[in-house]
Image (cartoon, rainbow, N blue to C red):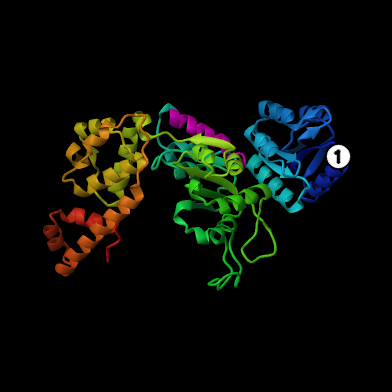
């Protein structure tokens, strides 16, 4: 197999030599240039698998070269070298398509990892065929998102995913990971709002044994657990300001320090984040740091509400119906024409998550092989919500509360009937099949 070829562009001879020696030791052949014009000549003369370029060059800006590469060599990953602490330059470079950035003075361990990641991305085949089957929908909005994901997956730039609750933000994040060169490494998803504030630093960065009361052993943090892969921070708006500062440093330095440790540890993690809140508004209100917002929002993806892509409702409904029936060993189920019409007219304030929950309930309560409009039991008042009205439901907490009530009621009935399921179903006024479905869903199967 031929050796990988790298182009190094920097006007400082000692930096060029350092990069060249490091890459040569990684069995990578190198060519060097001290300015833009000589770099452009080399790009025309041979094919490269990687490019490292300084931002400031004698005859122009590294971003100028980046624009040329994006236009003429779109598959070539570019690592941009920036001055220490030059966050604005790094973000600007990644917005224009750079694979990642490297700060001066150069940390050789970070450099080697970036180079390995860039070459892996360059040599990894694209896997576009999976998108359509994972992220369903043929609306223009969903086609555009899938196209963006294919492009985004080739870089390491942080991605900020916007969308209402239940719209599929975690699914989008997961797909970015699966289509990237990091797909063989962990995808760690965490809901920032579900972690107690006093445990956040330990959860994110880990801790050493004895570093605080109750620290009975070393603990790995989320960044370490996601090493080589992707860390997805859902509801990132819920992070307290103290942790926002530490997260910003982790992103900028590509290093973390566990509680109680004297050493920083280099981490190789791609960061994706999401929230249903207006993060820009929270920045204005001083609740979310502007510099952190700037760093996590290098690339922004907007996931549309289900009511704004109505042409996808039937496809999604049929997919979920088939999946639910298959998982519960039911015969093939179909929708009546009335049910399909009701689904198309419904506004779905809880988005795709609500659609799936509605169909799970309908399957549990229906009789026969046809799901009717009555089985769906859609709330008529919700259909009057205007398209422009934002919806910020406490869906999960309400569902959990109702599930606990249902679980207790079924458990009590089972106890009263000495776990005779037929008698229990009769007492609760439901079919045996519906009871079996609910037992499985609520984790009550013995």
Q: Can residue 252 be seen from the camera position used here?
A: yes
Q: Position of residue 216 (x, y in %)?
A: 55, 73
The extreme front residue here reads: 285
Q: Position of residue 220 (x, y in %)?
A: 57, 63
Name the image quarter holding residue 314: top left
Q: Residues within 10 Å of mark 1 (few under 14, many from 20)?
A: few
Which segment did they paint magenta?
A: 141-157
Left/right placement of residue 361 relative to residue 217 reads left
In front here: 269 or 194? 194
Q: Position of residue 356 (x, y in %)?
A: 32, 43
Label 1: which residue? 12
Name the image quarter holding residue 263: bottom right
Name the image quarter holding residue 309: top left
Quarter of the image containing the N terminus? top right
Q: Is residue 55 magenta?
A: no
Q: Residue at x 32, y 45 (%)?
A: 323
């Amino acid at each position: 197999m031929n050796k990988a070829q790298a182009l190094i562009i920097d006007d400082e001879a000692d930096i060029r030599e350092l990069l060249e020696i490091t890459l040569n030791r990684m069995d990578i052949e190198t060519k060097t240039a001290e300015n833009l014009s000589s770099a452009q000549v080399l790009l025309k003369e041979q094919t490269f698998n990687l490019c490292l370029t300084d931002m400031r060059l004698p005859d122009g800006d590294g971003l100028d070269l980046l624009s040329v590469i994006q236009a003429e060599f779109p598959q070539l990953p570019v690592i941009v070298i920036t001055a220490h602490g030059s966050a604005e330059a790094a973000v600007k470079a990644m917005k224009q398509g750079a694979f990642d950035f490297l700060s001066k003075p150069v940390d050789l361990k970070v450099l080697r990892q970036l180079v390995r990641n860039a070459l892996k991305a360059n040599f990894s085949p694209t896997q576009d065929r999976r998108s359509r089957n994972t992220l369903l929908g043929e609306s223009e909005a969903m086609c555009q998102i899938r196209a963006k994901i294919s492009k985004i997956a080739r870089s390491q730039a942080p991605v900020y995913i916007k969308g209402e609750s239940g719209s599929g933000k975690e699914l989008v994040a997961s797909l970015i990971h699966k289509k990237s060169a990091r797909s063989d490494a962990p995808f760690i998803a965490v809901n920032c709002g579900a972690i107690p504030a006093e445990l956040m630093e330990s959860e994110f960065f880990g801790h050493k044994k004895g570093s605080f009361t109750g620290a009975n052993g070393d603990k790995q943090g989320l960044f370490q657990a996601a090493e080589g892969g992707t860390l997805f921070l859902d509801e990132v708006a819920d992070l307290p300001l103290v942790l926002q500062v530490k997260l910003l440093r982790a992103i900028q330095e590509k290093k973390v320090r566990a509680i109680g440790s004297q050493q920083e540890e280099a981490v190789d993690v791609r960061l994706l984040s999401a929230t249903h809140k207006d993060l820009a508004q929270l920045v204005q209100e001083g609740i979310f740091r502007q510099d952190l917002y700037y760093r996590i929002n290098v690339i922004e993806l907007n996931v549309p509400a289900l009511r704004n892509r109505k042409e996808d409702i039937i496809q999604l409904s049929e997919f979920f119906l088939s999946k639910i029936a298959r998982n519960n060993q039911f015969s093939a189920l179909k929708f009546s024409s009335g049910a399909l019409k009701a689904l198309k007219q419904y506004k779905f304030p809880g988005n795709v998550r609500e659609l799936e929950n509605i169909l799970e309930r309908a399957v549990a309560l229906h009789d026969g092989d046809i799901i009717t409009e009555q089985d769906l039991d859609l709330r008529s008042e919700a259909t009057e919500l205007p398209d422009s009205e934002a919806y910020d439901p406490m869906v999960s907490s309400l569902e959990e509360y109702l599930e606990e009530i249902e679980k207790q009621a079924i458990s009590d009935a089972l106890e009263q009937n000495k776990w005779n399921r037929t008698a229990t179903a009769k007492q609760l006024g439901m079919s045996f099949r519906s009871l079996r479905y609910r037992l499985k869903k609520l984790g009550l199967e013995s």
